[in-house]
Each structure stands twice: as structure tokens, then as C-alpha cells.
Amino acid sequence: MSAADRHEVAVVGAGPGGLASAMLLAAAGARVRVFESMSVVGGRTSRITLDSNRGQFAFDRGPTFFLMPYVLEEIFAATGRTLTDYADLTRLDPMYRLIMGRGQSGEESPLRIDTTQDVSEMARRIAAIDPRDGANFERFIRDTRTKLRLMEPILRSPMRGVGDVVAASSARFLPHLSPHLSVDGLLSTYFRNPHVRMAVSFQSKYLGMSPLECPSLFSILPFIEYEYGIWHPRGGCNALMHAMADVCREMGVEFRFNSPIAGIEFDGARATGIRLADGSIVEHGHVVVNADASAALKRFIPEAVRLRFGSGLGGASDQHIDSRRYSCSTYMLYLGIDGAADLPHHTIYISSDYRQNLEDITTNGVLSRDPSVYVCNPTPLDPTLAPCGCTSLYVLMPTPNTRVGSIDWRAESLRVREVVLEQLERRFGIADIEQRIVVEKRITPLDWRDGADGMGAINFGATFNLAHNLMQMLHRRVAHKLEGLDGVWFVGGGTHPGSGLPVIFLSAQIGARMLAEELGLPAPRARPPARAFAAA
């Protein structure tokens, strides 16, 4: 392979991590080609459209919360562009509504709270729940602001081993570490009321984990919401993917859609290109994989190659990869309904028996009697997403993944649909919901696992990737550059720093910087002030 060929990079997957990597590598001077199994960009952040006799309804397939927009702005700035020239962003207030069930089966009136980025006002709303906890909210925000500042070098640095962890850490960070505490355990040092703790700990759902198990480091998640806000991109989060693809095309990145990958080609330990599902081979010096990391390790890299040359998870057997801990899955309903829904943009119902609900999802592998449900109602703010007089509702119910669960989703999907619709009517107040449905689509954990709609397969349907417990964080996640294998790179939620759009963008920054340096190209490092996205 010539030196010129070594500068050709194949990106496998046009999801957020792949698109961000393509932007940054093209900005550095690499020749980039993106291979995508679907006919559109986005992967799990793509758009779903459903046609009906009323017109077309549109939905985000996956992420609907856009947090830390300054991270994506940094990536646009590295290409000499500005995010807001390509995307129309609106800061949400309220950020979301929480409906917290009470009573053994939710028979008591639920507790409702609308969250706001105004910290003083939010403290007053918390004090209305429990006067002891109002003042502590502002203390929590101050403490966590310091914690995030000290954590930032870790979030922005590659984690190849303990040495990298130590190098990126500050001695001042150690008092904030609290490795023995869960998110809920840490929050109990601030808030006595369990409903208040619930309001600032449910965010562990962004990682597909229970706040009772999620490491206390992730107490930064609610802080990030209050510090930087929650945003809606016009058209949905999928519109960000199209904006990124537009920039890629402007920079000469080539896209090949409907091109699923069968595997990576190797000469010994060196990657030489990719093998497409049709059997054709395309040579590339480096391959950046933006797919479910665990599934991709098993599918794209022969087990014999991993065991002979690799290390860490990149050197693991299929059995060892499958033995890791995985996040929960999700049951999805995309509903086009007649009329409006009297809900804010984001509404989260938290089960009246939250601990049991979490245990059912993570350990028991069964469906709860009173499941937690999330609804996104973007149409009032963004009428482009539904025909006139109609509403697009995105509905998500966290479920066990297919390894933990014994649920027969083929047999149970319609019954689960009825449970979710009942929750929408009973908990969210959407009257006559079933009679108002114009069009709908369902995605079950089996669909996530098997790669429905042309998506890449997700190991055990665990939509938030590897679990984020302490033994699977930092250097214990899939490495950005697989050690022992030359030319194989990973980006996305299975790598450091973890799952969720903003940290996937951070993962892309880390990986692109490392690869550019290996290619002898200038590493893209633009860090704009991002004043538009600062704390309110």
C-alpha cells in the first residue's frame, strides 16, 4: 500500500461519531470516504418519516435531547464554519416536565415539576417539594461546576491505560471522585427528599443505567442541563446529522450509502481495507468504526485476529465481549396523532415504584406494572414535523436488554403497546390516544439487536452501549485505537468518554486528533468561545 493510500480513511457508519470524525479528519487534510448501511445519514440519530392520508409525520429515531452544543460548535469551528449557520437551535424552557408517580401502584396524585435553567427559580420549586432541599440545590450546582471543570481534561483525553488517567487527573479532583458512591448515594448527601433526588438523578437514563448503580462521577449530567441548557434543533436532532453531512460534502468527503460492511481486511495485524456485504474490497490505510462497538468487534474483526494481535476488548473473544455488562434497551412508539397533546417538549413519567422498575429493567428482565415512560412532543415548537392539525409524538419506554430479559418481543410487542398507550392516557393526560392515532411505528429491543431498517446491529439491543459502571469506564472501554491492530479505530458511545450525543462528539475529537497525528497531519483543535451556548 502506497503512502498516499495510507492517508485514505474509511469511516464505517454515518452516525454522529462517524460524521464528526469525517469532518475533523477532512479538515486536517485526510481523504475520507464514509460507508453507511442505510440510505440516509444519522444511524440511530436518523429521521423516521411515516406517510398517511393526512400527510407526512417525522420523528427522531433516537436522541431527542441536545446537550452541550458548544462541543459540536467546536467541531464546526475546526472546519472554519459555524454551527448556527447550518442548524436552527432553540433553548427550551421548561427544559422538561417530570411527573413522579406516588403510592404503591401510582394511585396517589403524582408530583409534577417543570425544570428551568434559572437556578434560583429551580431552587424555589425544589423548596416547594421539601424546604430543606431548596438551598442545597444551589450548593449542588456550585460543587458540580467545580467537579466538571476538574473532569474536563479526562473527558477530552485518550484513555489508553492507568497512566493516561493519572496524567489527565488533578490532585484537586480526588475529593470529588467518591468512587464508592452511586449517583443516588452522592445526591443523598445534598437532598433528603427521595423525589428531589429522583429529579436530579434520572439523567442516568442517558447512559442506560440506574442511578442506584451509576457511578457518582455522572452527577455532572443534571448539572450540564442546568448550566448549558437543553436545546431543540429545528427538524430534530437528525437535522444536526444532515448539517454535518453537508459540511462533509463541502470538504470533499465521499459518501457511499446502502453499503453495509461485512468486515475489515487484514494483512497480519494491519488493516488494509474493508469488505462490503456484496463481497467487494475497498483498500484504505485506516478504518474508523462508528457502530455499536461490541457488535462491531465481533462482526468486523475476525476472532482469530483479535486473539492473536489485539489487547483489551480489542483482543477479546466473542464470549468475553458478550460477558461484559450492558445498558438497558428501549421499546419505541412513533405516533402520528390527530390534534394536539397538552404537554411540554419533553415529559418524563417516573414509576411510582422507581426502585422496582429499575430492578425489573437491569436485573429481573421483566416489564414493570407501572413502567417509566418518556414522551417528546416537538410539534408545537417545530410544526415542520407533522401535518397541519396533527402531532408527532416520540414515546420511549426503558426495557431490559435481550440478554437480561426473557421477554418474547415478537409475541409481546402489541401487549406492550397497550401498556404504553394506557400510560400515555393515565399518566400524561392524552385523552383517547388510541382512537386518535393516524399512523404509527414500533421498535422493540429485538429490532435494535437485529439492526432493523438497515441500521447496524446492537449487541443485546443495548441502545446505550456498554454499561458505564466503574469497571467499564475510562481505559476499560473500547479503545479509540485498538492496541496491537494497526489502522483500526473506534468512535462512539462504546468508547471513552461514553454514551450520549455530546460525549460521542468528544470521542470523535479524541480519535480524530490521534489519527491525524499518526498521519502526520495537523490535529484539528479549534476551541471557539461558544458564547451563544454558555450558561443562561
Image: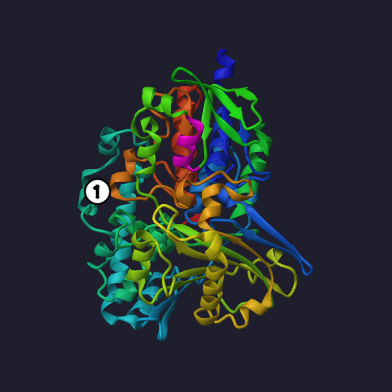
Q: Residue furthest top?
A: 2
Main secondary structure type of the part rendered in magenta: helix
Q: Nearer the viewer, residue 451 or 75?
A: 451
Residue topped by disc 1: 173
Query: Residue 417, how many percent across, how many down?
Result: 56, 69
Query: Residue 412, how many percent across, how many down?
Result: 53, 65
Q: Residue furthest right?
A: 53
Q: In the rendered structure, which amino acid carries the disc numbered 1?
A: Phe
Residue found 35% across the figure and 57% down from its top: 220
Left or right of residue 483, residue 30 in this image? right
Query: Residue 349, how many percent across, how many down?
Result: 46, 73
Q: Nearer the viewer, residue 283 or 360?
A: 360
Q: Nearer the viewer, residue 298 or 221?
A: 298
Is 488 located above or below residue 346 in the figure?
above
Callout 1 crowding tier (Cα within 10 Å): few <14, some 14–19, many ≥20: some
Label 1 sits on a secondary structure element that is helix
Left or right of residue 168, residue 446 in this image? right
Q: Quadrant of the N terminus?
A: top right
The quarter of the displayed image where residue 260 is located:
top right
Q: How is the image coloured?
A: rainbow
Residue found 35% across the figure and 50% down from its top: 468
First to last magenta residue range:
292-301
Is 484 located above or below residue 77 in the figure?
above
Query: Residue 534, how many percent across, how many down?
Result: 47, 57
Q: Is residue 91 shown to the viewer in this render? A: no
